[in-house]
Amino acid sequence: MDVSDNWTTQIRKGLLELCILNVVDRQRVYGYDIVKQLRGVDALLVAEGTVYPILSRLKRDGLVKTFLEESPEGPARKYYELTKRGQQLLAEMNAYWDVLTDGIETLRKESR
Amino acid sequence: MTMATPPLTLMSDAQRELDRYLRRVNAALRAHPSVDAEEVERDIRGHIAAELADSPALVTEARLRDVLNRLGSPHQWVPTDELPPWRKLLVSIRSASQDWRLAFVTFALFVGGFLTGRLGVVLLLASIPMARATLALLEEEGETLGARRWLVYPPLVVTYVTLLMALFAAPPGLIVTAADPTVREDMRRWFPQPFWVSLPIVVGLVAGLWWAMLGLLAARFVRWARLLFWPFADWFERRHAIHIVRVGFAIAALAAAGLAAVVWAS
């Protein structure tokens, strides 16, 4: 059971970054909305707070940028947007993901 | 870039819970160089406000706890492998909550410092970061210190009291220097009055100006002052530093008045 837990934790950590970048790629998005969209992916978001340190790190690495925008519902909100570098990296990550999942799927089909 | 925090009206116990949680967020993330702890804290505040936007006017602790539970424990947000080596070591020594091992290691270093020879200084010095790291780890995990304080506080109290005395009592060192006959002779050139008259004036001037300077530094770097004497100086604010400046200048002014009186009399 420990091996399984550890494995899913590691997988989740790597995938979370990919998913966040994909959410931010679609449109400029408010931090809380990123969490709401990720909630839709079962078993991905065990602790919702995990998203914010990742966003902070992505910003530090120059993959996303932030800006404040007035909100009709109250105070200004911080929005996230992919930088050029972020878009390039995301394209590479998505391509890698496609190759990986295709390969794994083929292996699984062969073993059936 | 700063972000305005949406206004939240929490019941007093909910507010205490939120403050405690945000302290844990800060404690858990400040050791990670890749993360801006203050920015994440602002994001978390925004998240909580957005989650509670549809709540009744006064948010209860139960409602808040529901949101905090979904956010999860801050020390699980960032992987342990990103921690600096000393932090990893501490985490590995601690096995579970209510673990007393770090507190015992701290106290053993402290006591060992007094019992061993030259090595003692190293042990004593080591007990200080160990005590602070133990406290930081407990805070990060939202654990109360409890009776462990009797093991963790002694090295900090001894160090901080010594440091405070050294900082504030440096000018009285002048008294010791002034007791030297050659220095007394030098002072007599400037102050023909008896030594017992000139000494308090000189000490008062030096001590007053020194304390004023310390106060100004503390007022400029309040956060550093708190950090230096953490966790006992969380109450310290700029107004306290200004008070030290005032006392310093008052003493210096008294000494200057004494000096003027002496010069005028001679």
Image (tube, coloured by chain):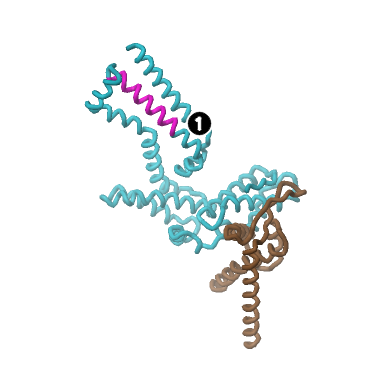
Chain colours: A brown, B cyan
Q: Is residue A76 above or below residue B78?
A: above
At horizontal 31% and vertical 22% (from top left) the residue drawn is B199
Q: Amino acid at mark 1?
A: Ile
At horizontal 65% and vertical 46% (from top left) the residue drawn is B14
Q: Name which quarter of the figure residue A106 lies in.
A: bottom right
Chief secondary structure of the magenta span?
helix
Q: Name which quarter of the figure residue B195 lies in.
A: top left
Which residue is nearer to you in this view: B121 or A61?
A: A61
Q: Which residues are magenta?
A: B195-213
Residue beneath disc 1? B242
Q: Is residue A20 above or below residue B238?
A: below
Spot occupied by residue B217 in the image (x, y as percentages of width and height):
46, 36
At horizontal 70% and vertical 44% (from top left) the residue drawn is B7
Say whether residue B136 is magenta: no
Spot occupied by residue B201 in the image (x, y as percentages of width and height):
35, 21
Residue lying farthest to the front in this orientation: A84
Q: Chain of mark 1?
A: B
Say whether residue B211 is magenta: yes
- Decide if residue B218 is in sight here: yes
* Relative horizontal placement of residue A32, taking residue B29 as reference (left or right): right
Q: Is residue B229 above or below residue B86?
A: above
Q: Quadrant of the C terminus of chain B?
A: top left
* Relative horizontal placement of residue B96, taking residue A58 as reference (left or right): left
Question: Which element is circle 1 on?
Answer: helix
